[in-house]
Image (tube, rainbow, N blue to C red):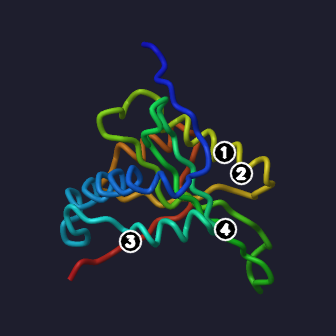
Amino acid sequence: MNEIGMTIRNAEPGDIPGIMKLLKQVNNVHADGRPDLFKKDCTKYEPDEIEQIIADPTSPVFVGVGDDGSVMGYAFCQIRRTIGQHNLVDQVELYIDDICIEESLRGQGLATRIYNEVLHYAKKNAFDRITLHVWECNPAAKHFYEKCGMKPYFYAMEAVL
């Protein structure tokens, strides 16, 4: 299989239309699995919110773009600090809020390439760990992150009433 050309870089305002398309795709994965929680064909952010996120140095956003400049995938991240807590060790983590690859391009290693860029960024900036949440209704994502070497950190549980 030939490797698909993709450049990974920091997101820019011009990437927002492509990011919006992917946000809808990832939301629909969740809406299909948990229609009691997620609305179909929606996004978690509006374009102006994405512009603010991109401009915020505590929320790095990486995009994978094709040779034509189209957004093929992204990783939304947040820098989280736990400092001065009575019961917790001081630490800085890079939380991955979302990784998404264009659905027609999935299964070709692009998510691994974006994850590896996030991992490189975290190591270069001396973060203590990378964390994320995976919805139980998304076993493919859980399998992907396990293949990347991630392990369960904690479990969130619920009782639907």
> Residue under circle 2?
122
> Residue under circle 1?
119
Disc 3 crowd, CA 10 A, few/some/many (<14, 14-19, 20+):
few
Query: Of callouts 2 and 4, which one flags the residue occurring earlier in the amino acid sequence?
Result: 4
Disc 2 crowd, CA 10 A, few/some/many (<14, 14-19, 20+):
some
| Residue 60 - label | none
Is 38 on the left-hand or right-hand side of 111? left
Query: Of callouts 1 and 3, which one flags the residue occurring earlier in the amino acid sequence?
Result: 1
Q: CA distance from mark 4 to mark 1?
A: 16 Å
> Residue under circle 4?
58
Q: CA distance from mark 1 to mark 2?
A: 5 Å
Give the residue displayed 66% in from the left and 70% down from the top: 80
Badge 1 amino acid: Leu
Disc 4 crowd, CA 10 A, few/some/many (<14, 14-19, 20+):
few
Whether the residues at callouts 3 and 4 have beta carbons within 8 Å, the answer is: no
Residue 77 position within the rendered picture, expressed as x and y whole percent measured from the top left? 58, 59
Badge 3 amino acid: Met
> Residue under circle 3?
157
Is 37 on the left-hand or right-hand side of 111? left
Which quadrant is home to the N terminus?
Answer: top left
Badge 4 amino acid: Thr
| Label 2 element class | helix
**Which label lies toward us, 1 or 3?**
1
Disc 1 crowd, CA 10 A, few/some/many (<14, 14-19, 20+):
some
Q: CA distance from mark 2 to mark 4?
A: 12 Å
Query: Of callouts 4 and 1, which one flags the residue occurring earlier in the amino acid sequence?
Result: 4
| Label 3 element class | loop
Q: CA distance from mark 3 to mark 4?
A: 28 Å
